[in-house]
Amino acid sequence: MASNVYFTNFRARRTSDNKVSKIKRLFHAAGFGELLSEGDLTAVKLHFGERGNDGYINPVFVRAVTDCIKEAGASPFVTDTNTLYIGYRRNAVDHIETALLHGFNFASLNVPVIIADGLKGDNEISVPVHLKEFEEVKIAADIVNADSMVVLTHFKGHVMSGFGGAVKNLAMGCASVRGKWEQHEAAQPEVDTDKCTSCGACIAACPADSIEMTDEGAHIIGATCLSCGHCMICPEDAIFHDWDRVPAFIDRMVEYAYGAVKDKPGKVCYMTFVMGVTPDCDCASWSDSPIVPDIGILASDDPIALDQACFDLVNQSRGFENSKLRHNHNPGEDKFKGVWKDVDGRRQMEYGEEVGLGVREYELIEI
């Protein structure tokens, strides 16, 4: 059975067509208010953006959602989790400062800003999933303890998953720091010792002191490696990703997404902004040029159908020539493989449907 995905484009002809009005109409058309109960502590899961990045969702748009949640009688808070990599969101103090810098504050949103996995990213609850990669997953405690959740996602590319949509927002975004490591562990870089000259550039670049020099050359210590890719600065190209391991990384992501919502049946809704579709994740400290024109905003209670619809709409567009898109510019071609040729993002929807996170078939309803 197909899931409903509600869609609005960005055309505007009068005041009632501005983006804030469109967001509120989408929220109500998708029936999100009926999914929330009076007094619900509702997590509004979004990405505050790394410093230097400007691709995150505009706080003005987030305010439109939090207002709708309050009108439904629930008590929202905006939230994200700390990062595995070294940056300005690795602990709750730096993370909240970054959120404030980007406009996510009580004055603009009229709701609290909370980091869901605590001061250092270790406030977690193990959620049983009993799937292929994991028996249990480590989800941020405040996500687990929330009564309901509204997931707001900026749709964009990603080097290891092809694209970042609702599934990735649930998977990486709701995991504790240790949970993020469990997902990234499948994609740790490797060393070609035949090319390694023991120059030490990778050791200097590694933020986690996870590389040691041996008689055979550099060795990556898997137990502490952050999979951040900083070591791939190697001047001899001796450090590389094994792209054959990418499907395992994506499967781990999907299982974490499943665990993030497993105990909230009928209490999670999703809204995805397909605008400023950059080739890289918002965890990057920059925002590259978009690869396609802005498309619109989509909403659903099914994250798989929603990601599939966003993926299809991007691929139906004509790609920008003056972007990181190397090929697949024509409508109907996979834009994300045009950037990250070794990654097939469709695996997210395929495995997501297999584990019961949602269905790929959808009916697109334009609002």
Image (cartoon, rainbow, N blue to C red):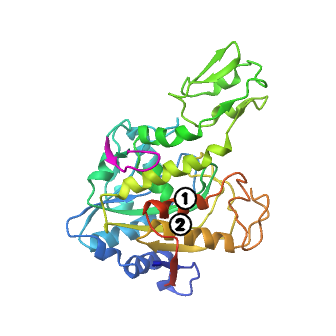
Gap in angstroms between the C-alphas marked 1 and 2: 9 Å
Quadrant of the drawing holding the N terminus = bottom left
Circle 1 is placed at which residue position? 348
Residue 170 seen in this snapshot: yes
259 to 36, vertically: above or below: above
Which residue type carries mark 2? Asp
Residue 282, percent from left and from top: 56, 52
Query: In terms of depth relative to the viewer, which is nearer, 144 or 281?
Result: 144
Q: Is residue 126 magenta?
A: yes
Q: Are marks 1 and 2 in contact (CB under 8 Å)?
A: yes
Q: Residue, x 35% and y 43% (percent of image)?
A: 117
40 to 229, vertically: above or below: below
Q: Residue, x 30% and y 46% (percent of image)?
A: 141
193 to 256, vertically: above or below: above
Q: Quadrant of residue 74?
A: bottom left
Q: Is residue 161 left or right of residue 74?
A: right
Residue density around tag 1, few if under 14, some if 14–19, many if 20 or more, within 10 Å? many
Query: In terms of depth relative to the viewer, which is nearer, 6 or 57?
Result: 6
Q: Which type of secondary structure does the marked residue at label 2 adopt?
A: helix
Residue 47 seen in this snapshot: no
Circle 2 is placed at which residue position? 307
Q: Is residue 220 left or right of residue 201?
A: left
Q: Which type of secondary structure does the marked residue at label 1 adopt?
A: helix
Does label 1 or label 2 sit earlier along the sequence? 2
